[in-house]
Amino acid sequence: MEQRVLKTLEYDKMIAMLVDKASCTYGKEKAAALVPHLTLEEVSVAQRGTAEAATVLRLKGSAPLGGIRDIRGPVQRARLNAMLAPGELLDIASTIGSGRRLKNFLLDMSENVELPLLQFQSERIEGLRELETEIRRCIDENGEVLDSASAELRQVRQEIRQLESRIREKLDQITRSSSYQKMLMESIVTIRGDRFVIPVKQEYRHVFGGIVHDQSASGATLFIEPEVIVEMNNKLRELRLREEREVERILYLLTEQVSFAVEALLENVDALTELDFMFAKAQLAWSMKAICPRLNDRGYLRLKKARHPLIPREVVVPVDVELGGEYQAIVVTGPNTGGKTVSLKTIGLLSLMAMSGLHIPAEEESEMTVFSSVFADIGDEQSIEQSLSTFSSHMTNIIHILGTMDEKSLVLFDELGAGTDPTEGAALAMSIIDHVISSGARLIATTHYSELKAYAYDRPEVINASVEFDVETLRPTYRLLIGVPGRSNAFAIAHRLGLPEHIIEVARGSISEEDNQVESMIASLERNRKTAEAERQEAERLRLEAEALRRELEEERARFAEEKNKRMEQAEDEARIAVQLAKEEAETIIRELREMRDLGVDIKEHRLIEAKKRLGNAVLELEKEKVKKPAKAVRATQIKVGDEVMVTSFGQKGSVLEKINNDEFLVQIGIMKMKVKREDMNVLKAANTQQQAQPYTSVKRRSDNIKMDLDLRGYNVEDSIREIDQFLDDALLAGLHSVSIIHGHGTGVLRKGVHEYLRQHRNVKSFRLGGQGEGGVGATIAELK
C-alpha cells in the first residue's frame, strides 16, 4: 500500500489513535508499524483477534496489562554475559510477573468463552516464577540490592553501619565541645568524597591536623578530616569496597540466571506484544463504538451508517454505501462543501481499517472486502516545486493509478477532470471511468460535471449518487444519497438569497432543453426518494412496534408458563399432602377396627359401613380432582353384575358384585363392599358377556391383591403371629372362606405357635393340617367364619 495514499486517507492519524491505546512499548511499536493486510486469511485472523479482545473487555472491563517493561536490551546483554543493573533486573521480574498474571487471566476466561487466538498467545508465555522470585529476593522495589541477598553482604553492611556510628560519635564530641565550637564554622558533620569531615575556620586549621578534603568558595572554611578519625575512615572505605564487590557478585549471579532464560523471555516478549496489540485494537474499537465487519474477497462492499472515525460522533453524518454488487462504480455529484470528499475518505479509510484488522464505526451487518490495493486522488495536488498546475498534478497521479491498479483495486477520484475546460474535462472523466471499469476495479468518483449524470444512467455497472442539500436553510445535510444524481441548486439558492425573479428566468431560459429535462428528472427522483424514505421510516416504525409487541407477547407467554408451572408444583405439593393424609386416615381406620376386634366387640354392619365410607373418602378424595370430564352415565335400569359403576354419593368408582334385589346391589369400592341403591349409581363400563356368565364367587376384586396362602418359613413365632393377624384381616375383607398358612416341617415350634394362635382367633372356624396336594404337615388350612 502506497504511503502517499495512506496519508491522503488519514490512515496515519488512525494509527496514532491506536498507538495511544497500547499499554507497553512493544504494543506501541507494533501498532505504529501496522499496515493493511492483502489476503482474506490474514484479514480474517486479524479481525478475530480484535473481536476476541473486545469480548474480554465487554465481559471484564479490562485486561491486566500493567507492569510490562521493555526488557529486550537487558535480555540481549545478559546473553552476552554483561552484568545487568538492579533496575534492569527489576524490570525483568516485573515483566515476568505481569505476563504470568495475564496468562492466568486469559486461560481462566477461555474455559467459559471461546478465545482461541488469545489462548494460543497466552500459552506461549513461560511462568519463570523461580527467576522472578530470586530477583525480588535480592532487589527491592527501589532497585537496591537487599541485605538478605547474601550472608556476606549482610555482614559487611552491618560492619559499615557500626563503624559509621563510631565515626559520628567521635566527630559529635568535637562539634559539641565548647573549646572547639569557636573554631568551627558550623557545628555539623558532613561528607566529602565518601569521608566524614567537619567545617573548620581557616585560621584554626593547624589545631585539628588530619586531611583537608575541600574548602568553601571564599576560602574561609576548610572541610577537614580530623586526624583522630583518618584510620577509621580508611577502614570504612575498605568495607565499602567489599560491599561493592559483593553486590557485583550478586548481580552477576542474577544475570547468569537471566541468560539461562533468554529464549523464554524473548518468547514472552513476542507473545505480550501480540496480546497488547490485540487489546489496543479492541480499546480503539470500544472508543469508536465500532463493529467487526463481515469479510469477503469478491470486491463487494456494503456500509450501513458508516461514520468517519476522526469526526466527533455528535456531528458526523453516517453514510450508507453499497459497491461491487449490482454496480461497479459510483459517480457522486453535488455542490462544494456538501460532504462528497468526506464520504470518499470515509469509504477509503474504513476499507484500510478493515484490512488492518481494526473494527469499523458502522452498524452490524456491514460487509467489507479485501482489496489488493487502494488508490486515491483527493485534494489540492498543486505542486509549486515541480511547476505543475492543479490539473497537471492530478493527471500525473491519475496516470500512475491507471498504470498500477488491477481488478481487485479500489480507486477513489475526487473532482475527476477538474481544473481544465469543462467540456474537455467531462469527456476525459468519462473516458477514465470507462477504463477503470473495463479493468474490473471498483471506483468511486466525485465530480461537478452534469454530463456525468447522464453517463451514469447509460451504464448499468455505474450508479449515480449525490450529497443532499437543504434549499430552505441553504446548508448541506452531508447525507449521501445513492441512486439520485446531485442538482446544482444555483437558481433555488439565488432565489432564496433575493435575486430578482426576472434575472433567474432569463438565466433558466439560456439553459438547453436537454439540461432542463435532466434537472426536472433529478427533481422528480428526489421527490420520489423523499416519499420512499418517509414510507421506509414509517415501515421501520411499524416494524419496531411489531417487534416490541412480539417481545411483550413472548414475555407474557413466559410469565404465563412460569405461573402455570408454579400452580402445577403447588397442585403436586397439595396432592402429596392429600395422599399422605389419606394414608394416615386409612391406617387410623384399620387400627380402630383391630382395636375393636381385640376387645371382642362384634362389629355391626352399620359400624363397618361407616368405617368403609371413611376409608373410601380418605383414599379416593384425590381421584376427584383428576377427573377432567365425568364419564357418560348409563340408565340405572341397565346395571348388572360385573359392571364398573360410579357411586355418585361417594364420587367413587366400584364394581357390581351381586344383585340383592331390584333396587339394591352389592358393590365393591376399593377394599370395601357395601350396599348401594340403583339410583345412586351410573354405569361407566358394562361387563362383557363372558364375565356375565361367570358365577359369583366370594373372591372378588380384592382377591387380585390378596393371596390365599401365607408363607411363614424363616419367621419366628412372634413375627409370624403379626403376619397371620394382618393376613386374616385382609382375607376376611376380601371375602375368602379358607386360607393356607405355610409353616414348613422344621422342629415343629412354628407350627405349634401358629395352631395356638388360630385356636383362639375369633374369626377362625376351624383349622387342619394340609392334605395331599395342600403341603401336607408343612401347611395348615384355616376355615374362616
Image: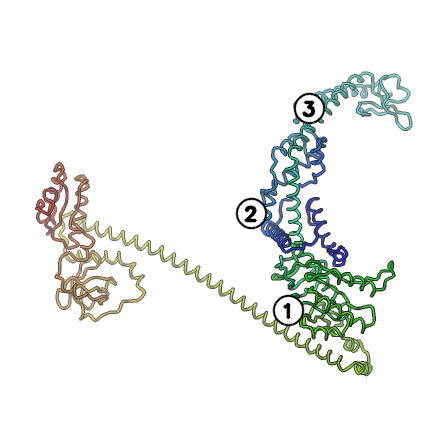
Residue bearing mark 2: 110
Circle 2 packing at 10 Å, graded few (<14), some (14-19), many (20+), is: some
Measuring 28% from the left and 67% from the top, which residue is drawn there? Answer: 630
626 or 80: which is nearer to us?
Answer: 80
Distance from disc 1 to disc 2, alpha carbons, whole Å, reads 42 Å
Distance from disc 3 to disc 2, alpha carbons, whole Å, reads 46 Å
699 or 571: which is nearer to us?
Answer: 699
- Quarter of the image with the N terminus in it: bottom right
Relative side of 541 to 431, left or right: left
In the displayed structure, 93 sits above or below 216; it is below
Circle 3 packing at 10 Å, graded few (<14), some (14-19), many (20+), is: many
Question: Is the C-beta separation of discs 1 and 2 under 8 Å?
Answer: no
Residue 551 in the image: state x and y as whole percent: 52, 64
Which of pointers 1 and 2 lies earlier in the amino acid sequence? 2
Q: Nearer the viewer, mark 1 or mark 3?
A: 1
> Residue 326, which numbered label?
1
Examine the image and state in which quarter residue 264 appears. top right
Q: Nearer the viewer, mark 3 or mark 2?
A: 2
Residue 511 in the image: state x and y as whole percent: 79, 80
Circle 1 packing at 10 Å, graded few (<14), some (14-19), many (20+), is: few
Examine the image and state in which quarter residue 458 appears. bottom right
45 or 493: which is nearer to us?
Answer: 45
Q: Secondary structure at mark 3?
A: helix
Measuring 76% from the left and 79% from the top, which residue is drawn there? Answer: 515
Q: Residue flagged by tag 2: what amino acid is it?
A: Ser
Q: Secondary structure at mark 2?
A: helix
> Residue 732, which numbered label?
none
Residue 349 in the image: state x and y as whole percent: 71, 59
Q: Residue flagged by tag 3: what amino acid is it?
A: Leu
Q: Residue flagged by tag 1: what amino acid is it?
A: Glu
> Residue 153, which numbered label?
3
